[in-house]
Image: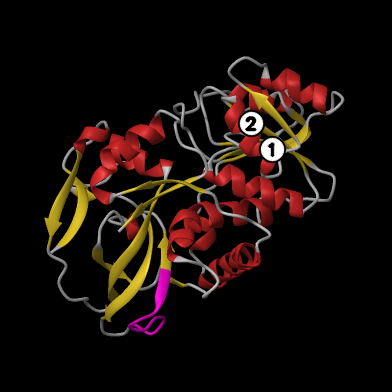
């Protein structure tokens, strides 16, 4: 029988339950998918703790890779036996499972150069990195960025991609071990936010100018420091709230700090168009398949260990990408 991680109330990691589930046959527009590997993302904790409200009970996880076992009526984008990966939001919830039914539309065919484990570790992070590097800002060689959580899954991909574009990368980390990892993946400079003033250090590293763009996945604890790290008319990209939501503020503050720009993008808005999703995925797969960008899978878990995996993730014990191996 198939297994899945589900939860019946919001809360800490202990609300997750590993259960038997009936999968059934795919309906119109659906496929039955056998998972090989499942991605673990910080966004998963937002569903679990109620930051992203969803009906209860529900499944956990939005990203996985596997093999198509059966297709429903009207499915034309994949066939039985295809190797696929997927990520999304509400339309892909339920990824923490050995087998599932899922709409065919989010599925992306995997090239032979990409393994199932690599796909599960990078589809969400990689597509996020792809739109951050290719859609958010018109980067030019020599531009500079501040990248929070530089040793995390998105951070390691973004820093490598940024170096391919000729950017100067400043990454923030919490330990010297993470600093070494970040530097090994493209960061020109690292700042340990545990004991350094990030904005002040950024000014030192940029001769007082500031950076063109900040990618901030931390939120509340780093927001003001991120704004103070930008050059005039720089762009603040809020890509997560690991430390909590950003407090309300008067937009005039952006003018006072140099006519700054601010955006809060979501991956769903960059992959909703099939042609744009294919373009972003194609460039990502090309970089990874050729070895120009390496995907670091530093934590492997069994699906029944989802509670521990969430504890590790929220306590910042992880680096790079984490996956469940089925």
Q: CA distance from mark 1 to mark 2?
A: 6 Å
Tell me the quadrant of the picture where the N terminus can be found.
bottom left
Farthest residue in the right direction?
207
Image spot of residue 171 (x, y percent): 67, 34
State yes or no: residue 39 in magenta: no
Label 1 secondary element: helix
From what the image shows, is residue 295 above or below residue 191? below
Is 177 above or below relative to 18? above
Regarding residue 31, the answer to whether it shows in the image is: yes
Q: How is the image coloured?
A: secondary structure
Residue 308 quadrant: top left
Q: Is residue 138 visible to us here?
A: no
- Residue 239 is situated, as x and y percent measured from the top left of the image, at 54, 41
Residue beneath disc 2:
179
Quarter of the image where one finds residue 293: bottom right
Q: State which region is magenta.
A: 75-84
Q: How many numbered marks, from 0 up?
A: 2
């Amino acid at each position: 029988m198939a297994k899945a991680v589900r939860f019946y109330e919001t809360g800490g990691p202990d609300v997750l339950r590993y259960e038997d589930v009936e999968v059934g046959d795919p309906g119109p527009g659906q496929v039955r998918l056998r998972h090989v590997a499942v991605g673990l993302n910080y966004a998963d904790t937002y569903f679990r703790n109620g930051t992203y409200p969803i009906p209860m009970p529900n499944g956990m996880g939005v990203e996985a890779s596997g093999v198509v076992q059966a297709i429903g009526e009207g499915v034309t984008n994949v066939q039985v036996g295809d190797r696929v990966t997927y990520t999304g939001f509400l339309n892909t919830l339920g990824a923490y499972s050995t087998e599932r039914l899922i709409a065919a539309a989010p599925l992306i065919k995997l090239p032979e150069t990409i393994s199932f484990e690599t796909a599960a570790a990078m589809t969400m992070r990689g597509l996020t990195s792809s739109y951050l590097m290719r859609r958010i800002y018109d980067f030019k060689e020599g531009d500079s960025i501040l990248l929070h959580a530089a040793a995390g899954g998105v951070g390691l991909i973004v820093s490598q991609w940024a170096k391919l574009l000729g950017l100067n990368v400043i990454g923030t980390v919490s330990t010297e071990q993470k600093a070494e990892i970040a530097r090994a993946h493209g960061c020109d400079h690292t700042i340990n936010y545990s004991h350094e003033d990030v904005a002040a250090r950024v000014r030192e590293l940029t001769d007082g100018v500031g950076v063109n763009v900040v990618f901030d996945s931390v939120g509340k604890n780093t927001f003001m420091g991120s704004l103070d790290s930008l050059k005039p008319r720089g762009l603040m990209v809020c890509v997560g709230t690991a430390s909590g939501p950003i407090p309300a503020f008067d937009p005039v503050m952006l003018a006072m700090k140099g006519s700054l720009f601010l955006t809060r993008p979501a991956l769903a808005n960059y992959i909703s168009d099939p042609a744009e999703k294919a373009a972003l995925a194609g460039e990502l797969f090309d970089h990874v398949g050729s070895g120009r960008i390496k995907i670091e899978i530093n934590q492997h878990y069994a699906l029944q260990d989802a509670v521990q995996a969430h504890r590790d993730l929220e306590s910042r014990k992880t680096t790079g990408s984490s996956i469940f191996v089925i």
